[in-house]
Image (cartoon, grey):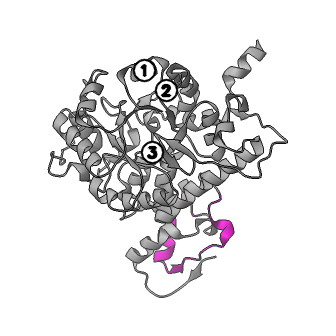
Amino acid sequence: MMKMSTQPVNVIELKKKLPDMCYECHAGMSRRTDVSKALVQGAHPVFGNSSSEPVNVNEFEELARLALPKMYYDYYAGGAEDEHTLRENVEAFHRITIRPRVLVDVSQVDMSTTVLGYPISAPILLAPTASHKLAIPEGELATARAAAAAKTIMILSYSSSCSIEEVASSCNAVRFFQLYIFKRRDISALLAQRAERHGYKAIVLTADTPRLGRREADIKNKMIYPPEKNLEGLISINIQCVDQGSKLETFANQMMDASLRWEDIRWLRSITSLPILIKGILTHEDATRAVEAGVDGIIVSNHGARQLDFAPPTVSVLEEVVNAVKGKVPVLLDGGVRRGTDVFKALALGAQAVLIGRPVLFGLAAKGEGGVRTVLEMLKNELETSMALAGCPCIKDITRSHVRTEHDRLPSML
């Protein structure tokens, strides 16, 4: 599949081509560097036919690994410490089975729903993820356009590599803004107010980061974190790493407010009129406290398994949180979603919608804006198929009786 040439190869140009290549045709080449060496030696890339294109979301990860420098791939893909929770976020979905109903009219399947009253085409949102320019030069602007094309909601990370204002002006769509609380509260207040002024429709408060989790891949790589676009002119971002950690870890541990408490929700309410969702809830105790604190929604999340290793996989505690909330506020799920069946299972356990993070980043790194669109379309198509085969013509037809969890099976084993 590789034709040799005696013509010199421009290394910069070949690197631009790598993300769009068909890597499956390069026998024995398991890393981007192998392909690079072959091209430098005069090989021409042979683009594959349709059978070599990704057919599911998981296949984008390998394309992203080949397209990205190791430091950036590890940053996107890695979790905390032994990465037990990272693996379990995905595996926990595999332990849930679907109980389909037959002889139901599913000639028309409607996946549309709403989040905080905003209509979306399917219950799949884009989770807040940092530094999309590590994937492609357009960064979050491309991601925002893909989300708008899919008619869904993007949650912009405070640590995006494009500013609040740039993303707001990129396209017409509903967006939320993710917020951390810094030791300097004036900076957090300014970020929230900028988001509100530029049309973002909700604040997503990340509550599980009093300090950064130990992300060992970033420590080994001495991760060089790109500038915080939204913090330009507000705070010093040229922090020297004085220990053996990453610069990101040093920055976060110096800037994040580890004294943040439930009472501070009132302060956040005082500086914005936007609805507030709290992200990082994993227990019924915290779900109850969140409702008492007056939040407008809960996101069950373990921060993509990047904070506390051996925290529970999110889908395993989803029902616990849903039961504690008792329908008072919507509950969303973040973590481990890789298939339309995963979305179906989360909805059956009480989630109003799910968030996807790494699949978006992998799609972006592999194929740019089109890759993100494809990732979203794949999940929507798989969800539609799952609903039809399970006998659920619309979202409200998906009920708890459609799934069986490990907890359900336990009594029958006693």
Above or below for 93 versus 61: above
For disc 3, the marked residue is 127
Residue 104 in the image, given as x and y percentages of width and height: 81, 42
Position of 357 with respect to 236 (left or right) is: right
> Where does the N terminus fall, quadrant-wise?
bottom right
Position of 215 with respect to 26 (left or right) is: left
Which one is nearer the viewer's eye here, 347 or 330?
A: 330
For disc 2, the marked residue is 310
For disc 1, the marked residue is 286
Tell which tag, 2 or 3, sits nearer the viewer.
3
Residue 192 in the image, given as x and y percentages of width and height: 26, 42
Q: Secondary structure at mark 2?
A: loop
Residue sticking out furthest to the bottom = 7
Residue sticking out furthest to the top = 414
Q: Which residues are magenta?
A: 29-55
Cα–Cα span, label 2 and label 3: 21 Å
